[in-house]
Amino acid sequence: MGYTTSMNFLVIANFKSNLTKEQVQSWLTAVKPVAGMVIAPSFLHLPLFSHLSPSLSLCAQDVSPFPVGSYTGAVNATQLLDYGVKYAIVGHSERRRYFHETPADIASKIKELLAVGITPLVCLERNQIAPQFALLDDDLIDNSLFCFEPSADIGGTTIAPISLIKEVVAEIRSFAPSSKVIYGGSVTPDNVSQLLPLGLNGVLVATASLDPASFLSIIRECSHVG
Ligand code: PGA
């Protein structure tokens, strides 16, 4: 295979609520972990990846906004740490939309994650930037990673307009000057090269990550980003 991404450029596979255990296992036989690769499987499938660290980094798709305790059904940040989780997605547009999560809920999740040393990957649409940052102090901001993730551009094959991505990423950087900022939304092997000159710190890939060949093509395209 012979390629690697830079640890400074993250290629994050978000499996969402897809794949059975068997399908994850066959994905893993097809994809060789490389530095810079970050995998966000379902909570239940995190143990299937734990032994592959540090060749790849593990990411949770969510976390409880509450600490350890009586919160039935919740998976807390300390439990994620048990599985070697390094990152956790919070504020994904699907969580905000289908689970009615608010900026305050997301701020609580960020605090829970950082309390145990897991890096939050905070997803934002343009209209969520100001209300979300208003709830975060500098320490939380400096230790989080941010993703511009326009819901209108999710699940297809065309990324958001480059001019929009540049503008919104600059807006996020004005609030978070020392944080990494990435883009997510319809990233495919065919369009990822358009994102590489933008100075992003990575990409969040869902649909195209489910197919090992597509995901490997994206990794290959990103392998020269310093
Ligand atoms: P997609 O999803 O790659 O399927 O567009 C991206 C995302 O939800 O962040």
Image (tube, rainbow, N blue to C red):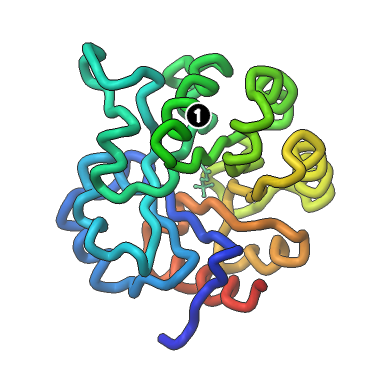
Split into 4 quadrants, where in the image is the N terminus? bottom left
- Residue, disc 1: 110
Front-most of residues 127 and 142: 142
Q: Residue at x 20, y 51 (%)?
A: 47
Question: Helix or strand or loop: what does disc 1 sit on?
Answer: helix
Residue 29 shows in this picture:
yes
- Residue 29 x, y percent position in the rendering: 24, 72
Viewed as shown, does residue 209 lie left or right of 49?
right
Give the percent coordinates (x, y) of residue 159: 66, 51
The x, y position of residue 19, in whole percent, is: 26, 49
- What is the three-letter code of the residue carrying label 1? Ile
Residue at screen point 45% across, 66% down: 215
Residue 153 seen anywhere in this rendered image of the structure: no
Percent of width and height locating residue 202: 60, 57
User: Residue at point 39% right, 36% down?
Assistant: 116
Determine the residue located farthest toward the bottom in the rendered image: 2
Looking at the image, the residue that sits furthest to the top is 70
Please tell me whether residue 7 is drawn above or below residue 20 in the rendered image.
below
Q: Residue at the location (53% across, 41% down)?
A: 121
Foreground pick, 135 / 29: 135
